[in-house]
Image (spheres, coloured by chain):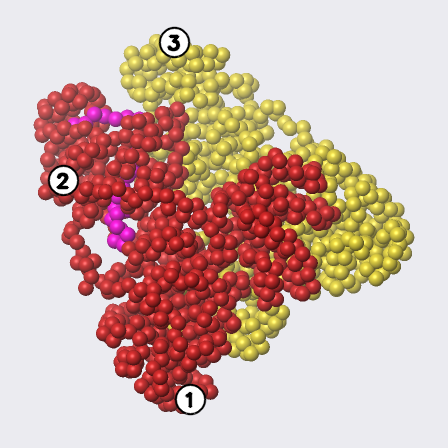
Chain colours: A red, B yellow
Amino acid sequence: MTTSFEHSRQPVGPDRLRSLLTPRSIAIVGASEKSAWSRYTVGNLRSGGFSGRLYLVNRSGAVTHGSQTYPSLLDVPNPPDLAYLLTSSGSVLDVLSDAAKVGVPNLVVLAAGYAEAGQAGMSMQEDLVAAARANGQLVLGPNNLGFINSHAGLAAFSFETPLPLLAGGVGIVSQSGALAIYLVPYMNSRDIGTSHVITLGNEAMIGAVDAMEFLLEDSHTTVIGLYVEQIRDPAGFVAVARRAREVGKPVVMYKVGRGESGARVAAAHTGALVGDDRVIDAICRQHGVIRVESVEDLVTTAGLLESYGELPGERVGVVLGSGAMCALVGERADAVSLSLPQPSVETATALAADGLPDFATVQNPLDVTGYVTVDPTIMAKAERRMIEDPNVDILVINTVLPRSESEGLTASLRAQVTVDLSAESSKPVIHMGFLPSETTPFVRQWRRAAGLPLLVESFDRGIPALAKAIWWAKRRRALDGLPAVDGLVAVAKPEGADGWSEAEAGAFLRELGLPYLPATLVTSPDRAADAAAMSGFPVVLKVASADIAHKTEVGGVRLGLDSAHAVRAAFTEIQDTVRAARPEARIAGVTVSPMRTGGLELLVGIVRDADWGLVLAVGFGGVLVEIHRDTAVRVLPVELREIREMLGELRGAELLRGFRGGAPADVDEVVDVIHRVSRIAEALGDDLEALEINPLLVDGSRIEALDVLIRWRTPPLDVDRNGL
Amino acid sequence: MTTSFEHSRQPVGPDRLRSLLTPRSIAIVGASEKSAWSRYTVGNLRSGGFSGRLYLVNRSGAVTHGSQTYPSLLDVPNPPDLAYLLTSSGSVLDVLSDAAKVGVPNLVVLAAGYAEAGQAGMSMQEDLVAAARANGQLVLGPNNLGFINSHAGLAAFSFETPLPLLAGGVGIVSQSGALAIYLVPYMNSRDIGTSHVITLGNEAMIGAVDAMEFLLEDSHTTVIGLYVEQIRDPAGFVAVARRAREVGKPVVMYKVGRGESGARVAAAHTGALVGDDRVIDAICRQHGVIRVESVEDLVTTAGLLESYGELPGERVGVVLGSGAMCALVGERADAVSLSLPQPSVETATALAADGLPDFATVQNPLDVTGYVTVDPTIMAKAERRMIEDPNVDILVINTVLPRSESEGLTASLRAQVTVDLSAESSKPVIHMGFLPSETTPFVRQWRRAAGLPLLVESFDRGIPALAKAIWWAKRRRALDGLPAVDGLVAVAKPEGADGWSEAEAGAFLRELGLPYLPATLVTSPDRAADAAAMSGFPVVLKVASADIAHKTEVGGVRLGLDSAHAVRAAFTEIQDTVRAARPEARIAGVTVSPMRTGGLELLVGIVRDADWGLVLAVGFGGVLVEIHRDTAVRVLPVELREIREMLGELRGAELLRGFRGGAPADVDEVVDVIHRVSRIAEALGDDLEALEINPLLVDGSRIEALDVLIRWRTPPLDVDRNGL
């Protein structure tokens, strides 16, 4: 649901948000023995390591959680930096007012019953924001569970959380408070530390984009982990994603809600092909945001990136100690298109010299086999050979962390080998477990002492996480080199364009330099026959009417007419059947065009997404696109090379290389034409709702639009979009 | 690799395998302080709870692992039931001979270097089997890591394993020993107990099918978990899968190695469409085997089935305490097509009466919202309403297990509520965690005391596991009602069929009652024109030659000929171009057939799989099948309803319901024709290699084969298949 309210939010700015997240003193308003929230919050602050002053406010002034309370904020001796409100929504405005009186700039509001609870709540939320703005206050929430600033030992969080806090580089932003309840212990159990955990709730004043902007500036944060159900500020999201890519902090996003939007332009096919979710996939791809499909994958991927940083290449070598593990890792790598190159001949020779038995085939993943029980040094030797292989950029090994002191000694020796290996080779060595297991405090301590990076918990999650980390680094390199799309000359929407038939829309595109099927508009059978003779037989006749989007369905198209006689007859038939089918339609005449046969048909559609703007979809036309939804999607603007990439993503891509004896398509030319379509759409700007070329004929180097549907926006601008 | 050796294995029989797995006395041959295997094996047997006699055999007779050893099996005072050989392959035959002398019937052989290590090893393995057979001995392995009989406290397993053994109902069969090293502790950490863990290694005498047959008879085993890289006995596998379904013990299989077989009939498209792996998918679907894609999913699914048994329906109600959890579970359920029905109006009314606030929308998953902190009883009330809903067969709730004694008290109260709920309603209540966590000994004990079933560890793995468990129960009900395919009359391969052109193959199918495009074979332009006049214009001319599989590619097909003149010209052109392209081809003439236009084109292909026999693939013809590989696959024989199910699996299924104004297909008739094709293929039996109808035209109720390719087997029978 996009509401005017959501679009009225103002950027918070990283410094202001930092002041909220790093208070030196906090007042808990609504502290009460009876409230579980209160017990958790006070307990977390006291035990987590918060070194500032903590004031408890309770209307009764009674001793609570062992401390004297103050009846109101007005009674607190020194105005706190932050007021943390556990009170119900009914008293929040009063507390805001008290806070303003004593000069409390920042607040956290947990209360529910606001925008998430319907129209009355929405209105209450507007009042909350208006009051805070008037007071110059900043509010986190409402309907959230607080925040954690791990490096400051500050757990202003209203549920049980593992203490001491595990400080690290992953900054978590979650629209859901409940998710954070589970996420933080889970990350802890995987030995992955956080910099901040910010639960946003309803995002009344502080949105995901604000939190991300803050984390981009935050020196402790190296990776951003994001849980969202709705992206409320699309333009801000694109900007912050771009900035994250520029500064080299990966964003890993788990977004639920893969629903389709029903509010699209139903007349164009493109609308149905471009679901909300595919647009978000496109945005992620275009801006280098890593999208994952579960909390577990969010944590594994963020942890891998935090520990191993930006990976230097994409060719992965794997050395393991059992055939089953190799089979399993190989299969998983295949499934996520991870590149496992064949080791070089030199590596094979060296391995043989190292004593690897003949029955161990030198491949990737490399199985050192049960021979490792005969010669335990073979594993380290094989790892060294693999990482020295010029075909390999990254090494993956299976590491088992010790569970006890005694195991720790043996493990330390082995760990030293890989630490040395990693230091000598400058190529990263990624440690991966076979199956998930939790880290104990002993293991955590041991790992840090041994100087080992994170043990990525399992192959099943680790291999896809590695593929995503490699994708991110690759994407970052590719996008950094991408020139900005060059200057664009705006094209005004012509007078009367709302009443265009396809013939007029086609003429318009032709004028703008797009290759479009020639067509002559005629209004009598004889003129039709003349035009056909001029164009050369066979020809196609199509009804010209602004009121008829699907000409075939009303009998408005006749194909393969190969004589003047046939053309005349077809003209009359079209006139009769269309009039019978659609008596109200205004008919401008009939167009005569040369008949094209053979070749491939593409659909090139552009449709406006309410959140993200103009979206381009490209796919193979006809049954392929309608049944198999085989399309690639991007948000405009797009560069030539991105269009080439889109064609490569289509499952039917091989059709372009020539199929069953057909000529290969001139892909450069196809890319160029699609790019021109996208530039025309952009040049039309705010006026355009949809522009769909279906089909775009591709026959070797002949690329030609055969039909088009253009929809304009009515009303031209959505008032809500201009803000309140 | 299918070898004659693998086909020479003989069924072991459950009783004989039981005797191997339940020894009262064991001799460890090759016990040695220096061997890690030896330390682990002896340690596991001593600490695991094995109550029988343990003898250590070491050539030196020195004290080992604190016990006196015997220099050879011949010196052991009482002949043990089982000899467990840690010796290298070189001395295995000698030990077998000693064992035979003192009457040891069963052996485990760990040594590697057998069939997995190439030709010499294969030959050594044949010697091993021959010797064992001659002695009447049974060998588990070689190249394995032993076995675990959990209910007997017997861990005859040569790697570290968590003790005490966690006894339960999951019987594990693994071709890989290394996998079991990781699998058992992982299952333990998930509180899922095993009945037996049998590592097979090279399956020289005891194969996966033998182990499964034993587990089907074993009273402790309720679910079979299977890890395989290769199914060595396809017919046995089908039989044991069917039997498992009949007795109601689900088989959950993780098979790696999704490679494609290159040895298929390259001339037919069907071969490329039916990879090895798709055939195994088809076998699983046909026989109710649950296939999973990771060890984690194997464990989660087997654990769920072990604890909750055969589920009574497929409509799942979910009650949770946060919106994020609901979004996440809803999305996961969608992804695996789990049915989450809308709660009834009565449920909504009852929930309102229970006090659920207005802002909590009554849907499924049902979010009781943060209101649960105001009224903690609302969760139990909502669960009760959901399970009483007539639209719901199964309830899923989120359970958090206690980590300590103090948490245990609160949790016990809550647990009692769900235990009562489950007992009262008779519908299963499935407990699921949000994110994975390990169970501690305290939790294990607590759960059993509370009478709670398994906590399925996470939504991300649990929801798909639930979908698979539901699928299994549904499949079992469906397959149990399936009549056996009725009597089949064999059809002999006609004389000269190897030299058939399409015209002859088509005539053959027409005789067998299949609707096949009429065709007249002619040998002159004039005869072609006559035949065309008889059939009615327009017609199609096709070259008739047994040597030309792809007629179009050599200019051997002319379509849409609408006059005698055009037919005569086309005849001559075909003759000329085909002769030019394929001068060596024998040309029988040209066929004249009526031209068909419109309708849908299906591909109906049958191809022989070396392991599984005749395989049927059905898909939409042309680009759809070749680019999108949109096919459904089954192993013959198939029932009518399975063919209907295949059509439903196609992504293009909606085409059959009428696409863009086309007439809907007569699906009954399509199913019937495909069934007839399958029966003809079966009737042809061993002679047939491939039979591909492409296309099968479907135009409303007209179903007609337009082209066929038949390949026969040469040489007719593979000698190896007859056994040694």
**C-alpha distance separating marks 3 and 1:** 112 Å
- Residue A389: image quadrant is top right
In the picture of the structure, the residue carrying the numbered disc 2 is: A500
Comparing labels 3 and 2, the label whose residue is closer to the camera = 2
Mark 1 surroundings within 10 Å by alpha-carbon count, few (fewer than 14), some (14 through 19), many (20 or more): some
In screen coordinates, is A656 left or right of B615? left
- Residue B357: image quadrant is bottom left
What are the residue bounds of the magenta stretch?
A592-616
Please state which amino acid type lies under the numbered disc 1: Gln
What's the chain of the residue with tag 2?
Answer: A
In the picture of the structure, the residue carrying the numbered disc 3 is: B524
Q: Do pointers 3 and 2 mark residues of a single chain?
A: no
Please state which amino acid type lies under the numbered disc 2: Trp
Query: Observer-nearest residue: B492 or B453?
Result: B453
What's the chain of the residue with tag 3?
Answer: B
Does B430 appear above or below B609?
A: below
Task: Give me the residue at 46% from left, 68% from top.
Answer: A151
In the picture of the structure, the residue carrying the numbered disc 1 is: A68
**C-alpha distance separating marks 1 and 2:** 76 Å
Does B408 appear above or below A228?
A: below
Does A285 appear above or below B340?
A: above
Relative image position of residue B176 (x, y in whole percent): 65, 48
What is the number of the mark on residue B571?
A: none
